């Protein structure tokens, strides 16, 4: 925590950016400043935040044509890059090419040694600037595969909520900007101020991963017919024991070839894909049924509930029982479920 000068934060506004992601973090920091002031300095309350909306352009219209007042680029301690409307059918090449001034600004900011933060698909701009090369990064789970394909030198961790690697912080989808803001408040003004700010704003200050929110039906398919066939086979044999040589034999390739081609397309091994798919299926069963943890484990291919619990906790950040408690809506009866035969 620091009690010195205000933390200078610049939010980079640009054509087509999400206005809510431009103002979301500043608004939460404003609430935190009021909370810190009310605390009267108790518990090491830090300095306030000095936020500006900056751009290399004179005028900026956000998504939906919403005009945003901006100031010129200036030296800041942290530059925040919001996401943009990555709609179906969008020409991503053309969009990123049109944002050359912003990409250059991001690159220059990092060359100065100052911290950089991206929100959601703002990571694509940082990657275009080359500042994510050889770094771990995250983005919206829906577009993680696209980022991985476009920038293979970036180590994309699709399940992470936030990642900081050597001065560059990337965040997951949309509302992860609030997790980012709370982390900034926690570091600058202390845990008590962050906790009270979260309570006032009705924010969850205990999230660790975006994995529980992944909708398998919205995930993009693997990039080639080969990988798509492998994932389809794994999906259809979710409850079967994983055996790499047997899987390779199904597709008439060596294990080495299978691993190489599958990773090239998906960024994962077949086992990693299978584990993530099993965890997502377990999430759904925990949220919508009254099956015991042992029954859920069996339904997704694990004989031992302890194995599922360990894997689930590693992927989701909490135990299956805690996940069920968090996502079960009161008054809504669980769905009937018929499990396929083993």
Image: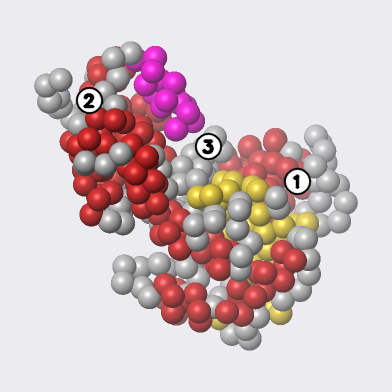
Q: Which mark is residue 240?
A: 2
Q: Label 3 belongs to which residue?
A: 208
Image location (x, y in percent) of residue 310: 44, 21
Image location (x, y in percent) of residue 196: 64, 39
Residue 237 appears in which quarter of the rendering? top left
Q: Are marks 2 and 3 in contact (CB under 8 Å)?
A: no
Sequence-wise, the earlier of marks 3 and 1 is 1
Residue 193 appears in which quarter of the rendering? top right
Disc 1 vs disc 2: which is toward the camera?
Answer: 2
**Residue sitting at 44 percent across and 79 percent down?**
94
On screen, residue 158 versus residue 41, left or right, reads left
Disc 3 vs disc 1: which is toward the camera?
Answer: 3
Evaluate whether residue 143 shows in this view.
yes
Image location (x, y in percent) of residue 44: 82, 38
Q: Judge whether residue 315 is colored magenta.
A: yes
Secondary structure category for the residue under label 1: helix
Q: Which mark is residue 288?
A: none
Secondary structure category for the residue under label 3: loop
Q: Nearer the viewer, residue 328 or 240?
A: 240
**Residue sitting at 43 percent across and 59 percent down?**
149
Q: Label 1 belongs to which residue?
A: 188
Please tell me whether residue 96 is drawn above or below residue 121 in the rendered image: below
Circle 1 packing at 10 Å, graded few (<14), some (14-19), many (20+), is many
Evaluate whether residue 330 shows in this view.
no
Which is the main secondary structure of the residues drawn in magenta?
A: helix
Q: By what rule are the colours in the image chosen?
A: secondary structure
Q: Judge whether residue 310 is colored magenta.
A: yes
Disc 2 vs disc 3: which is toward the camera?
Answer: 2
Q: Which residues are magenta?
A: 305-321
Tell me how far mark 3 sits from mark 1, CA to CA: 20 Å
């Amino acid at each position: 925590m620091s009690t010195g000068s205000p933390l200078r934060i610049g939010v980079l506004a640009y054509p087509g950016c999400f206005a809510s992601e431009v103002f979301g973090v500043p608004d939460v920091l404003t609430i935190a400043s009021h909370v810190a002031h009310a605390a009267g300095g108790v518990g090491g309350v830090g300095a306030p935040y000095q936020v500006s909306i900056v751009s290399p352009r004179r005028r900026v219209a956000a998504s939906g044509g919403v005009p945003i007042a901006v100031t010129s680029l200036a030296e800041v301690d942290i530059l925040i890059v919001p996401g943009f409307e990555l709609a179906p059918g969008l020409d991503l090449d053309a969009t990123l090419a049109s944002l050359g001034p912003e990409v250059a600004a991001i690159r220059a900011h990092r060359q100065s040694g100052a911290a950089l933060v991206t929100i959601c698909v703002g990571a694509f701009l940082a990657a275009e600037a080359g500042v994510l090369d050889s770094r771990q990064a995250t983005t919206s789970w829906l577009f993680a595969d696209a980022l991985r394909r476009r920038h293979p030198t970036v180590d994309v961790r699709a399940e992470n909520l936030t990642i900081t690697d050597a001065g560059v912080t990337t965040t997951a989808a949309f509302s992860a900007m609030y997790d980012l803001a709370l982390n900034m408040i926690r570091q600058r003004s202390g845990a008590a101020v962050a906790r009270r700010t979260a309570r006032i704003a009705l924010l969850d200050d205990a999230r660790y991963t975006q994995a529980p929110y992944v909708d398998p039906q919205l995930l993009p398919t693997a990039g080639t017919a080969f990988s798509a066939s492998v994932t389809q086979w794994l999906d259809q044999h979710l409850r079967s024991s994983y055996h790499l040589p047997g899987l390779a034999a199904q597709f008439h390739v060596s294990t080495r070839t299978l691993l190489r081609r599958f990773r090239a397309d998906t960024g994962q091994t077949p086992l990693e894909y299978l584990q993530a798919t099993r965890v997502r299926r377990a999430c759904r069963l925990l949220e919508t049924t009254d099956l015991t943890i042992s029954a859920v484990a069996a339904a997704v291919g694990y004989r031992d509930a302890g194995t599922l619990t360990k894997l689930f906790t590693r992927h989701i950040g909490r135990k299956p029982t805690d996940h069920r408690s968090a996502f079960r809506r009161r008054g809504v009866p669980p769905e009937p479920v018929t499990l396929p035969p083993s």
